[in-house]
Amino acid sequence: MKVLLLGVTGNVGSRMLPALLAHKHQVVAYVRSPAKISSEATSKLDAVVVGSASDSAAIKAAILSHNCDAVVNAAGLAAMTGFTSQGEFPAIFAAVVQAILEAGRERGSAPIRCWLMSGFGALDSPKKPNLLLHYVPLFPSHKQNYQLIKSQPADILAWSLFCASNMSPKYNTPQFPPSADASASNLVAKADAPPAWVQKYRSVPLIGNYLNIMAQAQSYYSVLEHCVDFIAADLEKGLESEWIGKRVGVKEKSKVE
């Protein structure tokens, strides 16, 4: 696929690029500061578009002018709590969604495939209909973003939310090509809820659900290179992906009890 990648100079996006290339995708980088892209990365890009990640009109133009089949948004950082400014992240998310919708309507063909970065708290908790955010109210913008994306028409926007917990890079710098051990095969995944969840402490009166979640949250920390490979590999499936219209939770196989 030809993929528009936002956030290529960031921690996630810089590692997403080699993963996408390893899976034979063409990549168009959409970036505010092209000087921050390494010369090695620049040489491997199909094109570079300069613009703000919160400018929906510019993102739409990039999708259409480069005939992109898919969008991966790795731009922006979610604020940890609701007591501080939420920064640009919600605006970026909304701008990307709006751009894809408008580009899809104007193009009038198949839906545009997109992966958007979200967070662990946007997954369902063991006690439905609550999200994990209900018990661990961190990174609240993920709930707002999920509410926005799930209301969009599936015939235009074929979305997936990547709802990982903390993602730490295995290597200090992006690897071109990715290391052989940087593979989605190291992960288990599940739609809309954390995979391989274990029922712990739920019988404790009043606080059982909180204890259950708090006791396991850190076991969902994952390796960033494994996560970006998961997304890049899934994009090879195009519109046949089983993850379309889903929030996707992952866990390292090495941490499955």
Image (tube, rainbow, N blue to C red):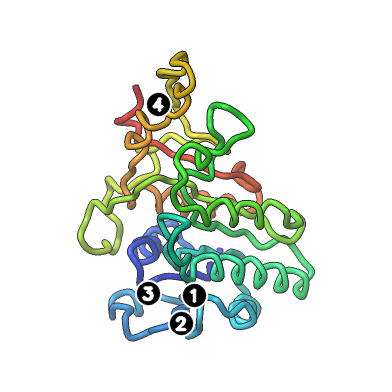
Q: Position of residue 191 (x, y in %)?
A: 57, 37
Give the vertical position of 99 relative to 113 (above or below).
below
Mark carried by residue 28? 1
Three-letter amino acid code of the residue under disc 2: Val
Q: Position of residue 119 (x, y in %)?
A: 47, 49
Mark carried by residue 48? 2
Three-letter amino acid code of the residue under disc 4: Leu
Mark carried by residue 16? none
Q: Few, some or many C-alpha atoms within 10 Å of disc 2 (few <14, some 14-19, many ≥20)?
A: some
Q: Which SS class for mark 4?
A: helix
Q: Which residue is mark 4?
A: 211
The residue shown at (59%, 35%) is 130
As measured in the structure, the alpha-carbon distance from the residue carrying label 2 to the one carrying label 1 is: 6 Å
Q: Which residue is mark 3?
A: 44
Q: Which SS class for mark 2?
A: strand
The residue shown at (29%, 78%) is 38
